[in-house]
Image (cartoon, grey):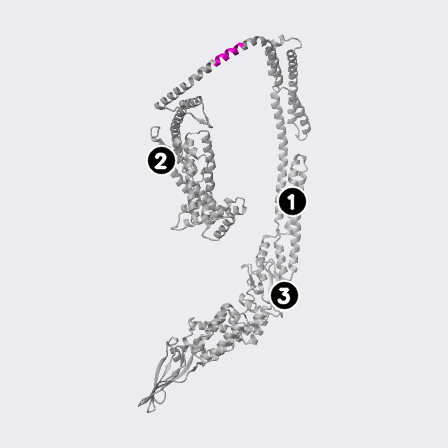
């Protein structure tokens, strides 16, 4: 667990300065040295960690380390004090712990990096936002927001966010502990989890969760146990320590133990007997250290007697140095410090040295003093007799004057009695005699006045105890003023008992007044509290009738409060409560105005017939702070969909996606529009142009002879280049010539070079070998060059949406072409349409979609442009290809596209309009009864989305109800029926129903 009670660095520096100034020593200063050394070590460790983080490029980690308790850079700056050199010398002299040098270089580098960052707050907020989004970095997010809150305490948002983060982590800790307890073999024990969160500084010790509280308590118990063991170790080590042994090791153990107990705030947690033993050890070690440091101080003083001492750059007198040594010796004797024999001898030598130095000076001084004393004595004796008589008279007069100034009876009577002899001797009309007469008259007057004062106070006390204090207030005030005047004229030492009686009466009078006022104020506070409650209830009324009832109750209490404020006895409360009364009346008036405005707003809402004004009025009603919570919630559910209502025409009810919306949101008809090609589409088409494997493929009829006049077999073969025939060579029995032939292999790739094939014609008219008829361009190449290439060029130049579909229809009719050739080009054309299905009609034709899916299954998703040239495919075409092509598409795709496009075009010209609204109970209130039979849309209270109203759908209160309206006012079902009849397609059934706009479904 983290230590939390480190001594403040500023406080340590202040104490060091005070210790150096006052030359403090002893065990407390030794503790101070230990705390200082620990603080420097901790600061150096933190600076090294922070600099290491900064070196690896993480300023954020560096700042987090700096923000740990205590603050790193602030601590380093405070510890870098100007008394370090003097303090180190003092530590070395008294054998205190010496602090290591502070790593100021690392602190400077860190400070410089922070300053170079620029706007630190903006940067930290950016780091926090990026971290806060991660679910796995909650700890780090808490550290960062804690850093922001610490560096910028004026940022209230950061403070609130920190509190929220802290609460989240506390809840997370509680949850993790509960999960750990519920698992048979948990990954972490509850104590480990709690310890991990405590290291973050979270206040889990005060958690109300029993499991967390138990784990924190166990961790604290373990920590206290460790500290108790450390305490016992220190006690054991110090048991045999004395000034003759190595007591400094025992002291080091004791100081370490004291420091640990202090920073962990555990002194009160360890057992009482251990704490008592530690205190005993402390007392023992303090005595030893006191004896040790006393000897050091005396040896230092002896050295100064012999060698001199300077203070404030001036030499200290020998007498002062000797006095200091004597003072230290006396203090040692008083505290029972035993001085070694060698030290005592050194002191005697020092005193002897001082006496030798002072002897000539004291002899001269004594002679001078004797001469001055004799002269003074003679002068005094000569004048004494001459002034003694006048002095006595003057002294008597002064004594009487002083007693008069003091104005006390006892002192005046005592002065008269003391100087009566001198008064009797005084001459007539002398000042002394006149002053004595005045004082005697004053004494007589004071005695009579004291009697009157006592009677008046007694009468005043009786008046106070009777009647209403406020009714008698005028008389009491007048009487008290008279008594106070009498008291001012009376001597201070007379009437003391009556003074106390008068003060008691005044206190009683004020207490009685206060009791009356307190009662009135309590009654006033009760009415004020009732008024506040009534006003608060009125502000929370859920309807107009409830508000009017609560308003009347509040106004009644307001009138009562105002009447009570007219009482003069609590007039001071008027300035306090008058603004409150005024604000209450104004508040009730404002709320009444709001209720009137709210009722009017509801009436206006019911009158609106268009969606946009209806939503705007809903928003205005929602802004009323007096609106009931359930109504505000219902309105909020609809207003959250304000943008969805605005974009409803482009939503799924009309178009399934943005591509479909783009295809039909043009002024020109869908089928005749020439859409602009995308870069991907252009690349796709350009790839299919000028392909040699389709453009220049030749064919030749081959006849095979086996010594007969008629060919044994005849077939067609594709050639990479035209066949050529060599000159014939005649022999005695036959004529021989050869053909150069370059065809394709089994993979459909061109042979590397032309083959030479011989043909023999014999005398008997028979033939041997393969005879190649003259080559011609293959029908596939002719079709590619004449039709497909033309279509590709048209598409690149700009063609309507049916161009690809028409090419597919034409391709299907070319039954003389290779099946593999036709399959491949169906794949490419459908693949092009698949890039943007809504642009080229693929999304509107279930037949084409089915054909595209079948092709992918048939070819396993593979397009092979060489397959139709394969010698195997030439010899025996794939039967599955023939079977597949036997199922003709015909004109169905184009018919489907035209029918569905017409429906989408009509839909795009329509839009949603307000048909009514949902009542508070969820029932529909429609402008036209006939709309109940049409498709309607509103806000689903369960999903919070705009859905088609079904039989089991629960409507959100006050939500608008919409119907889809076509340009000609037709109903969707009528338009669908007409379109099905015109196209001959069952558009209301699958698979067409899935492709229709939602308004038709």
Q: Position of residue 784 (x, y in %)?
A: 47, 77
Q: What residue is disc 1 on?
A: 584
Can see residue 1001? no
Q: Which SS class for mark 2?
A: helix
Q: How crowded is mark 3: few (under 14 residues within 10 Å), some or many (20 or more)?
A: few
Q: What residue is disc 3 on?
A: 929
Q: Position of residue 746 (x, y in %)?
A: 37, 76
Q: Quadrant of residue 299?
A: top left
Q: Residues within 10 Å of mark 1 (few under 14, many from 20)?
A: some
Q: What residue is disc 2 on?
A: 233
Q: Is the magenta stretch mostly helix, strand or loop?
A: helix
Q: In this view, does 387 lie to the left or right of 245?
A: right
Res. 314 mark: none
Q: Which of 390 and 541 is in front in this view?
A: 390
Marks 3 and 2, how far apart in space?
95 Å
> Which callout, 3 or 1, points at the residue further toward the start of the chain?
1
- Count numbered badges in the picture: 3
| Front disc: 3 or 1 | 1
Q: Which residue lies furthest to the bottom in this view?
A: 764
| Figure quadrant of the C terminus | bottom right
| The magenta stretch spans residue 879 | no
Q: In which quarter of the image is residue 265?
A: top left
């Amino acid at each position: 667990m983290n230590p939390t009670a480190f001594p403040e660095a500023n406080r340590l520096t202040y104490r060091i300065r005070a210790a150096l100034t006052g030359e403090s020593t002893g065990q407390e200063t030794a503790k101070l040295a230990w705390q200082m050394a620990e603080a420097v070590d901790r600061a150096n460790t933190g600076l090294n960690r922070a600099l290491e983080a900064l070196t690896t490029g993480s300023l954020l980690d560096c700042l987090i380390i700096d923000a740990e308790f205590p603050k790193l850079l602030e601590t380093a700056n405070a510890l870098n004090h100007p008394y370090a050199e003097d303090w180190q010398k003092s530590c070395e002299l008294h054998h205190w712990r010496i602090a290591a040098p502070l790593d100021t270089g690392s602190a400077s580098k860190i400070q410089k990096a922070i300053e170079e960052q620029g706007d630190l707050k903006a940067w930290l907020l950016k780091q926090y936002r990026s971290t806060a989004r991660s679910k796995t970095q909650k700890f780090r997010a808490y550290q960062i927001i804690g850093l922001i809150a610490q560096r910028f305490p004026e940022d209230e948002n950061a403070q609130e966010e920190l509190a929220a983060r802290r609460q989240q982590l506390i809840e997370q800790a509680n949850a993790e502990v509960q999960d750990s307890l519920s698992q048979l073999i948990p990954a972490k024990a509850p104590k480990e989890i709690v310890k991990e969160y405590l290291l973050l500084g979270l206040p889990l010790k005060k958690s109300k969760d029993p499991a967390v509280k138990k784990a924190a308590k166990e961790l604290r118990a373990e920590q206290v146990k460790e500290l108790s063991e450390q305490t016992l170790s220190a006690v054991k080590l110090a048991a045999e320590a004395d000034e003759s042994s190595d007591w400094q090791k025992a002291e080091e153990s004791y100081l370490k133990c004291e420091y640990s107990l202090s920073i962990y705030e555990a002194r009160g947690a360890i057992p009482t007997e251990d704490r008592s033993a530690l205190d005993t050890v402390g007392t023992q070690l303090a005595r030893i250290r006191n004896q040790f440091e006393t000897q050091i101080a005396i040896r230092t003083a002896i050295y100064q007697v012999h060698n001199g001492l300077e203070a404030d750059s001036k030499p200290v007198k020998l007498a002062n140095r000797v006095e200091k040594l004597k003072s230290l010796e006396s203090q040692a004797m008083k505290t029972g410090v035993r001085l070694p024999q060698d030290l005592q001898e050194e002191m005697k030598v020092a005193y002897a040295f001082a006496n030798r130095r002072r002897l000539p000076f004291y002899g001269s001084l004594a002679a001078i003093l004797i001469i001055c004393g004799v002269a003074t004595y003679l002068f005094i004796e000569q004048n004494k007799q001459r002034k003694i008589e006048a002095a006595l008279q003057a002294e008597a007069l002064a004594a009487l004057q002083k007693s008069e100034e003091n104005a006390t009876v006892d002192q005046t009577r005592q002065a008269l009695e003391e100087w009566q002899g001198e008064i009797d001797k005084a001459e007539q009309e002398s000042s002394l005699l006149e002053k004595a007469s005045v004082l005697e008259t004053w004494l007589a007057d004071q005695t009579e006045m004291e009697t009157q004062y006592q009677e008046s106070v007694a009468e005043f006390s009786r008046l106070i105890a009777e009647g209403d204090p406020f009714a008698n207030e005028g008389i009491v005030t007048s009487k008290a003023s008279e008594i106070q005047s009498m008291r001012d004229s009376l001597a201070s030492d007379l009437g003391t008992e009556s003074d106390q009686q008068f003060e008691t009466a005044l206190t009683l009078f004020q207490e009685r007044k206060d009791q009356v006022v307190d009662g009135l104020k309590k009654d006033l506070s009760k009415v004020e509290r009732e008024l506040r409650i009534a006003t608060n209830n009125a502000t929370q009324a859920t309807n107009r009738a409830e508000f009017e009832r609560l308003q009347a109750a509040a106004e009644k209490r307001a009138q009562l409060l105002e009447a009570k404020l007219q009482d003069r006895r609590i007039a001071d409360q008027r300035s306090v409560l008058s603004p409150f009364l005024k604000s209450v009346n104004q508040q009730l008036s404002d709320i009444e105005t709001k209720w009137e405005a709210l009722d009017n707003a509801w009436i206006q809402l019911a009158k609106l017939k268009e969606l946009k004004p209806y939503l705007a009025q809903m928003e205005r009603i929602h802004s009323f702070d007096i609106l009931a919570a359930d109504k505000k919630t219902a309105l909020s559910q609809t207003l959250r969909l304000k943008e969805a209502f605005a974009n409803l025409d482009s939503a799924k009810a009309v178009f399934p996606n943005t591509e479909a919306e783009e295809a039909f949101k043009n002024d020109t008809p869908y089928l005749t529009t020439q859409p602009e090609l995308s870069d991907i589409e252009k690349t796709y088409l350009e790839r299919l142009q000028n392909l040699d494997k389709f453009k220049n493929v030749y064919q030749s009829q081959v006849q095979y002879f086996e010594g007969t006049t008629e060919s044994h077999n005849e077939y067609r073969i594709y050639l990479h280049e035209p066949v050529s025939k060599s000159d014939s060579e005649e022999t005695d029995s036959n004529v021989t010539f050869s053909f150069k032939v370059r065809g394709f292999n089994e993979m459909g790739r061109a042979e590397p070079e032309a083959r030479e094939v011989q043909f023999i014609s014999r005398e008997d008219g028979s033939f041997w070998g393969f005879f190649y008829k003259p080559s011609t361009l293959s029908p596939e190449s002719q079709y590619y060059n004449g039709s497909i290439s033309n279509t590709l060029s048209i598409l690149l130049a700009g063609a309507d949406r049916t161009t690809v579909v028409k090419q597919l229809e034409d391709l299907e009719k070319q039954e003389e072409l290779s099946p593999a050739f036709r399959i491949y080009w169906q794949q490419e054309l459908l693949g092009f349409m698949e890039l943007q299905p809504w642009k080229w009609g693929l999304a509107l034709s279930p037949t084409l979609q089915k054909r595209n899916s079948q092709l992918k299954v048939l070819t396993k998703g593979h397009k092979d442009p060489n397959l139709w040239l394969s010698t195997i495919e030439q010899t025996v075409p794939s039967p599955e290809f023939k079977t597949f092509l036997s199922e003709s598409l015909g004109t169905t795709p184009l018919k489907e596209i035209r029918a569905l496009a017409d429906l989408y075009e009509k839909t795009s010209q329509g839009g949603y309009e307000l048909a009514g609204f949902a009542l508070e109970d969820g029932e529909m209130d429609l402008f036209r009864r006939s709309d109940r039979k049409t498709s309607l849309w509103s806000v689903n209270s369960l999903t919070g989305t705009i859905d088609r109203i079904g039989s089991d759908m629960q409507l959100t209160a006050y939500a608008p109800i919409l119907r889809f309206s076509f340009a000609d006012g037709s109903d969707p079902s009528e338009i669908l029926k007409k379109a099905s009849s015109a196209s001959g397609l069952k558009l209301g059934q699958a698979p067409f129903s899935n492709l229709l706009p939602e308004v038709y479904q």
